[in-house]
Amino acid sequence: MEKEDANKTVMNNFTFNRFISTLPPSFDYFIAFYMIILILLTVLLNGLLLIANWRKRKNLSTFDICLINMSISGIIPAIFSYPLLVYSSINHGWAFGVSACKRDGFVVFFFAVVQIATLMLMSILRYLKVCHPIKDNILNQNHVIGFVFLTYVYSAIWTLGPLIGWASYGIEPWKLTCSIDWTNITTSYLICCFVACYLLPLLCIIGFYSRITIVVGNFYRSRRVLSHRDRNRYDQHMLKLTVGMSSAFFLAWTPYAIVSFMSSLNMQTISIAATPIPAIFAKSSTVYNPIVYYLMIQRFRDEIWQLLCSFRLSKKKVGGKSVEEMRQEQDEMKGIMLELLKDVKEMKRGMAISSTDSDVKKSSSSHIAYKNLATEDDPTICTQVCSTL
């Protein structure tokens, strides 16, 4: 009996020591503080994104649907996983056991791959819209929703493996959170995971957006009627979008991918005290995406501003009209403008078909691609109520 009690005590001490933080207490508290800020920003920014899209749910574009998926896949780990890291940091060690560790590692990795796959999907859809507008016109909301569903299937293929014996989830070296156990991983899973969850999306993002930049640049150089200022302004906009997306991807995942890959090869790349840094960068991707899309693109900034204005002035009236009435009138005007743009496209298409000059046809097709891009990226007009604040 005494021997069994002694063995039980040894096992309990082993389990306890296994999950004790390897970081200084001050670093643990810093991680807790940082993660609290990250949770608040993730929920706030992604929540604003979801509300803004809900307000225009009848006129969602294909990219709006992808943005909604990015927000959902960012909020879920911020709500269900990141608080565990906060508590463990304050507790100076993982405090939820082995089973919860596996679930936590799966949740974080699953939604991270969903976000990466969605970024890859958005680069493909953007490429079709700009470079192949005829193919893009075939796609509708149901098609895009189906593609978004495939991002979850794609993620499940690579993240369920460790739960069924193909690799495993375990505690991170710093003992505060969980992920794939990179020090005990099969070579086949390592290669497949690195290629499918990092290298392939990275190449797609760089390749498709580079092609978009080239096509748009060629289009503007072929149109002498556009001023040099207009060309520079739009080229800068496309460059900002491309660099922003690619930088967010690199910043979030490259450090973690490198450290994890080296750890799987039993190569000591950085000290134990520095191991949380790549993981924290990767977790921060939940807040990078709304910053890139809603703070670097004018249209998204205007939508957030309108949303904040409507919250503040929901009960006020200006000129005898409520904010809601003015917003409805603005939506009706947008609908009229979209119909006019469609008519212009049809006229241009008819002119291209009737023309016998192949260069004119090519220019018209490029013009349709530009209109598709401009229709999506042109900034919306902020409501006049904001000017009264």
Image (cartoon, rainbow, N blue to C red):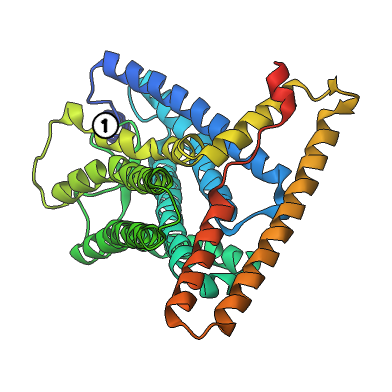
| Residue lying furthest left | 267
Q: Secondary structure at mark 1?
A: helix
Residue topped by disc 1:
276
* 374 on left or right of 202: right
Is residue 375 visible from the viewing direction of this image?
A: yes
Q: Residue furthest right?
A: 320
Q: Horizontally, is 144 left or right of 253 in the view?
A: right
Total marks shown come to 1
Above or below, 128 against 93 in this view is: below
Q: Is residue 4 visible?
A: no
Position of the N terminus by quadrant: top left
Q: Quadrant of residue 307?
A: top right
Compared with residue 204, is residue 139 higher up or lower down, i.e. above or below?
A: below
Q: Nearer the viewer, residue 73 or 70?
A: 70
Measuring from the top left, give residue 168's x and y in whole percent: 31, 54
Q: Nearer the viewer, residue 116 or 339?
A: 339
Residue 223 occupies quadrant: bottom left
Estimate the x, y position of residue 362 in percent, counting from the top left.
45, 75
Residue found at x 75% / y 53%: 335
Rendered image quadrant of residue 288: top left
Whole-percent x, y for residue 308 in the image: 66, 26
